[in-house]
Image (cartoon, rainbow, N blue to C red):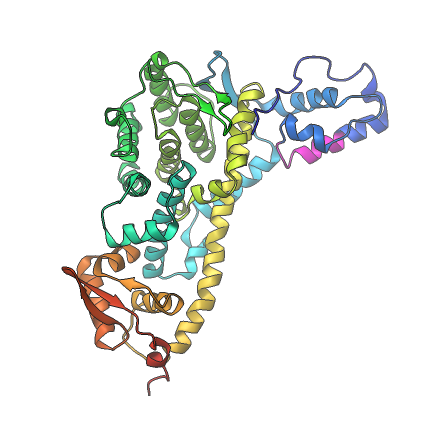
Amino acid sequence: MHKPRKPPNEGPILQPGRLADPAVAAKIDEIIRKTQDQYLHWEEFRHIFSAPPGTSAEEVWRFLRVARWVDRRTIPLLSTGGKPFSYCVPECILRDLHWIDRFGGGLQHASPLAEMDRDERERYLANSLMEEAITSSQVEGAAVTRDQAKEMLRTGRRPRNRSERMVLNNYHTMQRIKALSDRPLSPGMVLELQRIVTEGTLNKPDAAGRLRRPDERIDVANEEGNTLHVPPPAGELSERMERLCAFANEAGDTPFTHPVARAILLHFWLAYDHPFVDGNGRTARALFYWYMLKSGYWLMEFISISSVMRESYGQYRDAFLYAETDDEDATYFIAYHLKVILQALARIEEYVALKRGQNAEIVRLLDGREGLNYRQQALLARALRHRNALFTFRSHATSHNVTHATARKDLLYLAGLGLLEKRKRGREFVFIAPRDLPERLGPPQA
């Protein structure tokens, strides 16, 4: 990955009189309309669009840039060169913001979760928290599989290595964010989140919960070691953190910023400043979640943005670099992040459709068996899909976000029916699905 080249923003927009040519004007109008739906950087634009006869791609780009920036809005984040970052709101961003307003923060009956009952939503929430904790760590280099990490979180065992500790820290961070969602942001709160994210994982343990120092230069480089981003010097970080918190708390006489855009800009801001020795990306994503929950977007608690970002990591990185190389235009990062949110929300709909089919099968197998609650049915469905699955009171309680006593009652009841086998492992009981579980489930009871 190379750093994208700076766009040709200096120079003539178009040769004199060229817009008077109807063919040229129509072609330029077509280009502007198409780019309203995809906020392209020069690096992409120059490969996709051809300039009208008698003009150059550079001239058309400058014309497009002027059209984009009619509604330019600055934010208090300054680049290392002292220029303020800004963003604009083209049609593609307006459309995505509207969709998220309707389905991410609207009434619950308008959400795909409306098809789930309370127990199923609690299970989905528990899995989403684990998914975000795992993939946010993987984005930052954690070498851990999803199965290993979920087994650790469900059973409550101690992490075996740094990667598993990263996952556990992220899980605790996501839980802490919800408790902090009714408070204004402060530098102390940001430091607290970074401390939770990094505790027990740093080569310099004292770097958890504090800003980096002048002798701790943290540049962002690519796989070949080439520098992509040089964050602000350590001496500026305290003042920049105060300004970030003021922006989060909507302090000062600043123009209206849509809450979702503000949450995304908080993510961008902290990642740009890179104020910590480690944990900057994870803390930045935590701030995004914190502000979304604080602003009433309750459905955000049920999605994992990191799972989408991990799959499109190149685009995630490019969104930062495009903003930095094109005259501090943060619109690139907003546009990318909105697509991530929409994809994450779409996965809820996919999950509901999948569960609808799975539930139909489990209903067929459990037909006539009364007294099984949703949690027990979900456990049996998992046992049918994963014959080697092992369950404990702790894992069942974590998966369904219920108390230990409720989990104990669920598992002992299933063991009493002969649908699980109870065994002793060390000092705890474990429950295993018998190999002939489908036969034990059917035929239906009379």
What main secondary structure does the magenta stretch of the protein show?
A: helix
Depth check, front residue: 299 or 272:
272
Up the image or down, 203 lies above or below 433; here it is above
Q: Is residue 87 visible?
A: no
Q: Is residue 162 visible?
A: yes
Up the image or down, 233 lies above or below 256; here it is above
Segment colored magenta? 29-39
Q: Position of residue 279 (x, y in %)?
A: 35, 31
Q: How many marks?
A: 0
- Quarter of the rendering containing residue 175: top left
- Per the image, is 37 magenta? yes
Residue drawn where x is 39% and y is 21% of the image: 218
Q: Position of residue 274 (x, y in %)?
A: 39, 23
Q: Position of residue 140 (x, y in %)?
A: 40, 35
Residue drawn where x is 85% and y is 29% of the image: 23
| Quarter of the figure with the C terminus | bottom left
- Per the image, is 45 magenta? no
| Quarter of the figure with the N terminus | top right
Depth check, front residue: 93 or 138:
138
Q: Position of residue 172 (x, y in %)?
A: 27, 41
